[in-house]
Image: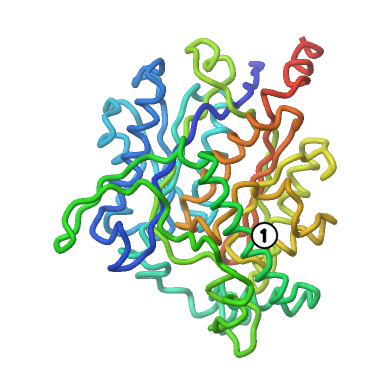
Amino acid sequence: MPRTLNEVVFVDGVRTPFGKAGEKGMYAQTRADDLVIRCIRELLRRNPQLPKDRVEEVAIAATTQIGDQGLTLGRLAALLSGLPNTTPGYSVDRMCAGAMTAVTNVASSIGFGAYDVAIAGGVEHMGRHPMGEGIDPNPRLLAEKIVDQSALSMGNTAENLHDRFPQLTKERSDAYAVSSQAKLAAAYDAGKIQPDLVPMATRHSERGYGLATRDEPPRPGTTLEELAGLKTPFRPHGGVSAGNAAGLNDGATACILASETAAEELGLPVKMRMVSFGFVGVEPEVMGIGPVPATEKALAKAGLTIEDIGLFELNEAFAVQVLAFLDHFGIADDDPRVNEYGGAIATGHPLASSGVRLMTQLARQFEEHPEVRYGVTAMCIGIGMGGSVIWENPHHADYARDDDEVA
């Protein structure tokens, strides 16, 4: 029988403040699943017009699916968030792009008509579950030279990117990192980050109870001179340091996606409409280049060019990876369209959760920039992949015109 495909919209997104991983971090003794449950509960509180029984899927990502990040986390998070036991859920793993993949997975199901409303997100507690905990890579990967040893260390892949593109110097990476810190500080000062942050209760056996209300990783006031003096742990005299890369972090994100028809029926806000997405594989040894072909793929699927994109939210796993993207597309390092509120170098990067942070920030920027019609959220992914999603701004004057022409 003939099928009618649905338009998919981003209704709302939230995140916890991101913490520093480790015993000194604010979430040191907070459960990982409680972080994402807090996000889901906040989404339901912020959108009371959404009946709980209309949420038809919960997809939650985690890179290290073990302990309190394991056991089909999406289903457990749904139950613990107060959704009815008729709401199914599942877990996702695409390393750093876990939440991004959770979004595109449920969006595809909404577009196909399998359901109308879903929640997608991600969580990573890197203090409780370090990346790679409990894994057992097949020895053939190295023995048969399927990948180089460096492919298994994300920091080394970033150094490889410096090698491949000599114009991407450490000095450029440091300058970009300083800018990221400054932009996040300015966004906080202007109150642009706080609206989508969920205060998170914390507890610690020695420090007692607390309330997390701001990101822990930012280092406002960072200078080039400070970054120049940092060690390069992955290579002597290398290009990657703790100052121009995202740290090890804890945090969670979640968002509501719906068919455009269901959003209108329920009176839900429409903050963005999904246009297209692309995931690609690249050489694992230079995984940071992944967002380039992923974005090219998403643009081709949408019939757009890079000139059509007015805002970019690029995950800053490493500064060199963002610079490689910018160079490829002829975009200046300090282009104001890129990461207007700063990025993961300042905010933090709790792996599988970060994709929805990019989307939530892009949605806020769409509100501020009605002149921009299209934006991109993109990120590199471990073991040599890239992901990119193109979104349309509902505040743009031409947003509804295409629908009218089709009708």
Three-letter residue code for mark 1:
Gly
The residue lying at 39 percent from left, 25 percent from top is 46
Task: Using the rendered view, name the quadrant where residue 290 is placed.
Answer: bottom right
Q: Does residue 261 appear left or right of residue 350 in this picture? A: right
Expressed as whole percent of the image width and height from the top left, the position of residue 129 reads: 34, 64
Q: Is residue 400 left or right of residue 112?
A: right
> In the figure, 2 relative to 376: above or below?
above
Q: Looking at the image, which residue is at 48% across and 75% down?
A: 138
At a point 73% along the width and 48% down the height, the residue shown is: 336
* Residue 255 screen position, x and y as percent: 47, 35
Q: Nearer the viewer, residue 9 or 243?
A: 243
- The color scheme shown is rainbow
Residue 235 vs residue 56, the one in the foreground: 235
According to the image, label 1 marks what residue? Answer: 281
Please identify the quadrant where the C terminus is shown: top right
Quadrant in the rendering for residue 323: bottom right
Residue at the spot x=77%, y=11% of the render?
404
Does residue 226 appear to the left or right of 371 in the view shown?
left
Residue 75: give x, y in percent of width and height.
Answer: 32, 39
Q: Is residue 107 above or below residue 61?
A: above
| Tally of numbered tags | 1
Residue 137, placed above or below residue 344: below
Q: Residue 151's spot in the image, x, y percent? A: 59, 75
Label 1 environment density (alpha carbons within 10 Å; few <14, some 14–19, many ≥20): some
Quadrant that contains the N terminus:
top right
Say which element carries label 1.
strand
Q: Which residue, as the protein is rendered here, is positioned at the far bottom?
A: 236
Q: Quadrant of residue 322?
A: bottom right
